[in-house]
Image: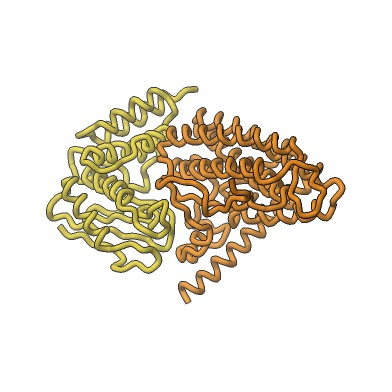
Chain colours: A orange, B yellow
Amino acid sequence: MRKSFPVEDLARDARFVRVPIMERITDPRNAFQEQAGSSSRRAAGRLTPERPDAPDAARALMHGIFVGEIQALEGAGRTCWDFEVGAGDEEGVPEVPFELKLDMARQCWDEARHCEISIKLSDHMGTELGEFSENTFLYEAACNPDPVLRLTGVNRALEGLAIDVFNTMREFGELAGDPILEFCEDWMLADEVTHVKMGSDWLRRLTVNDKDRQKRALEFQRVVDKLFSLGGFRGEEEDSPVRLARRFRELAGFKEAEMDTLAEVAREARSEMEAQVARNKIAVTG
Amino acid sequence: MAVEIRPETFSLVLFDVEEIRALTEQLVAQIGLPRDASVTVEVDETTPLGYAHVTSLSPVMLSLESGALEDPKRPRQMDPVGSADVLGRLLFEVRDRLDPAFGEAPASGDLTLPEASAWQAYCVGRLGRLGHHVQRQRRLYHFRNRHAFSDAADAAFDRLWNGDGLTWADIVAESNGALAAQPA
């Protein structure tokens, strides 16, 4: 069996269609979106039941969660297989403690359950599997050849994003009076807090005597966190569709300063997206 | 019957004007709008959002954001099945509004979210019986979000979905009944 499975070869049936994130970013219609904070209705905004399109927006986000769970399962599964068991202190040999693999196996179990919950929630919300496009940037973060960087990218950045998204959906379900959505998201959220905690713990344990590696891992996390902020889709602005779930991130071991940094990274991502939109506007309208 | 599509050519999305026209003509005939009705479909291609509503009855004017006709799996491309769902729903709304027996409904922009979801359930249910692909569970989810996740709301939805010859007063009564039965 191959090590470090490339994203292009992930198994999907004909229902699933992948759309690269750049295709969304370079959509010429983005050039006509108003700047952030505008009162005109050109952007979706925060997910609340008051939005006329709220049920369909929730369906689309739920489908994104579903394909994200598939990729999280694939990522954790690859980490069980891609690295050998060992102390990891020999140069060039990607080794991990057996206990780390056990944690990843437990995570696979959780992610598989989340896939099944997501399928049932999709049925509940009237969504067909593969109804929306899939973006594989989550799995791509799980392809780093250094196990410490991979764990940081997956368990702190990806699973951290999952905390924010699940909390958003849990709140939406609560406000909409949908107990099925609310409780399913709450249960999955509890697992994600555990997954992030695993990432934080292993980052600390594996880099306790290697501050340079720890620094590289945190730099990698910052890059991934910016990517996962999706141009301000996730952030702390009033109109961010997905908000940072500070309380749950705190439970997962994030420090206040780390969350402030993450909020800053999200603002940077939003500014960069707005600059990209401005460039597109010039390209489209002249 | 005259069907006009605006704009005459698209530059930001990859929609085919003739495909939209043919689909609209087919739906107008199936739904049974008056033969002399002229229908304009105006698409705002500058936004990927998906709002769609009836803005005029004489002549019939349907205003849509491009996301309403877009394939959710293929950015900027039209989805014929989803487009039939949206255009068919709007044309059923037009037919209801043109029918004196239906009664006087508020303008599209003045409908409450529960009223809008109840009327949509009634429209899309009839569209499905014409043989078009529709998503019953999706519409039920919309209805539950706007009324309640309750047995009473589901029963009201069933009556709207399977209904025929309903009036605006019937739709409002089903919507209000479902809202009144909300769990505490």
- The part of the image, by quadrant, that contains residue B21 is bottom left
Task: Name the residue furthest front.
Answer: A1
Say whether residue B175 is left or right of residue A153.
left
When asked about the image quadrant of residue A35, the answer is bottom right
| Whole-percent x, y for residue B107 in the image | 32, 47
Instruction: Answer whether residue A25 is visible to the viewer in this image.
Output: yes
User: In the depicted view, which residue is nearer to us: A54 or A196?
Assistant: A196
Image location of residue A61, percent across then percent down: 51, 44
Residue extending farthest to the bottom is: A286
Residue that protrudes farthest toward the right in the picture? A209
Q: Is residue A27 above or below residue A45?
A: below
Is A283 placed above or below B24 here? below
Instruction: Identify which residue is drawn at 49% across, 66% down.
Output: A31
Residue B108: % across, % down: 34, 47
The front one of A195 and A86 is: A86
Q: Is residue A112 above or below residue A52?
A: above
Q: Quadrant of the N terminus of chain A?
A: top right
Let me know if residue A160 appears in the view: no
In the figure, is residue A42 to the left or right of B8? right
In percent of the image, x 64 and y 46: which residue is there? A158
Q: Position of residue B70 (x, y in %)?
A: 38, 55
The front one of B5 and B177 is B5
**Left or right: A258 as drawn, with respect to A235:** right
Number of residue marks: 0
Residue at 38 percent of width and 57 percent of height:
B66
Residue at 49% from the left image edge and 46% from the top image edge: A11
